[in-house]
Amino acid sequence: MSTDVSIAAPPSRIRGLSQAAGAMFLVGTLAGVSGVIQDYPVYGGQALRYLLAAAILLAVARLAGLRAVRLTAREGALLTALSLFGLVIFNVCVIEATRHGGPALVGTVLGTVPLALALLGGRPSPRVLGAATVVVAGATLATGLGSGDLPGLMWSLGALFCELCFSLLAIPLLPKLGAVRVSAYSAALAVPLLAVTGLLLDGTAMLRVPTLPEALGLGYQAVIVTTVAFFLWYDALPRIGAATAGLFAGLIPVGAIATGAVLGLGTPSAPDLLGAALVVAGIVIGLSAAGPPATATATAAGSPAAGGRQPAAGAGAPAAPANSPATGASGRRSP
């Protein structure tokens, strides 16, 4: 079964491709601000980040006329799992992996996201697998093969699993909730989970008044990396499918390189530039292999951007595949 569960008309596909690219590039810029907030309590800072993001997204939903939706028990479980794995535990894994093996190790492991999503897609063509492999190679080269111990590797693999959950668990929720509400609800659920983790590990020291640079850094994470990037990614998934969208995960190190250059944090090296070129080449190969969808089932009214409204009867709403990261072969986001 393919992870491309919704079929989009060419304009919608183009929009999805550009949004997926933009979302992953913005996620990559996170590296440029990480140094600014490195001394702020981690879990308290992330709780503040998601609290601000949830407030913004809920305000956007209200202004857009998107009312609260009653979830079934299954949908509530999916949303909780999405927030727990895709946001909270993902942050924990990245933090611990960085402590043990440094950012290069976790960055290299996360660079395998395109290949993992292609494999979870069921029966990817040799060309798609080849494209994903090229993207992985480019991301690895751009990130750098870091050194680390076994715990660092295990934490990195945990981060990879959670990153896949971030995409796969969301897919069955998007037709009903839409990108804005999935982003808002998952961010809101992450706040108490992170707060409890912070209290258990840091006690009352989990929060303090941030300095101006720290406040700006946390604000950037909340507004750009969470609010904007989450919406772009979740709006793109039903348009192009997780397998195709996953190719753009290779742009994360490219975004980090570009941000570092713009902020004067370092000039890209030859391996950096070669890795970025390989990522772009792999994405181009993968998109040419995927080609445009055969039939159009995603209408403007049924798209996530329209608040998740379903197409009219007979319009052929996309089927929602299995919904757990373990069954990742489905088209729903198990992430």
Image: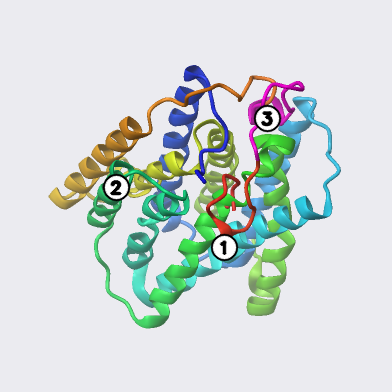
Question: Are circles 1 and 3 on residues that touch, CB within 8 Å?
Answer: no
Q: Count numbered badges in the picture.
A: 3
Residue ID for mark 2: 135
Residue density around tag 1, few if under 14, some if 14–19, many if 20 or more, within 10 Å: few
Q: x, y percentage for residue 302?
A: 68, 25
Image: 41 above or below 268:
below
Q: CA distance from mark 1 to mark 2?
A: 23 Å
Circle number at residue 326: 1
Residue 328 appears in which quarter of the rendering? bottom right
Q: Nearer the viewer, residue 295 or 138?
A: 295
Question: Are circles 1 and 2 on residues that touch, CB within 8 Å?
Answer: no
Q: Is residue 119 magenta?
A: no
Taking 187 as reference, is 237 left or right? left
Taking 323 as reference, is 38 left or right? left
> Residue at image x 69%, y 35%?
175
> Which stretch appears magenta?
303-319
Residue ID for mark 3: 317
Point out the frontmost of discs 1 and 2.
1
Q: Nearer the viewer, residue 308 or 25?
A: 308
Q: x, y percentage for residue 57?
A: 69, 38
Callout 2, which amino acid?
Val
> Residue at image x 50%, y 43%?
2
Q: Is residue 318 magenta?
A: yes
Judge whether residue 267 can be spotted in this image: no
Question: Mark 1 or mark 2: which comes first in sequence?
Answer: 2
SS for callout 3? loop
Q: CA distance from mark 3 to mark 2?
A: 31 Å
> Residue at image x 27%, y 41%?
282
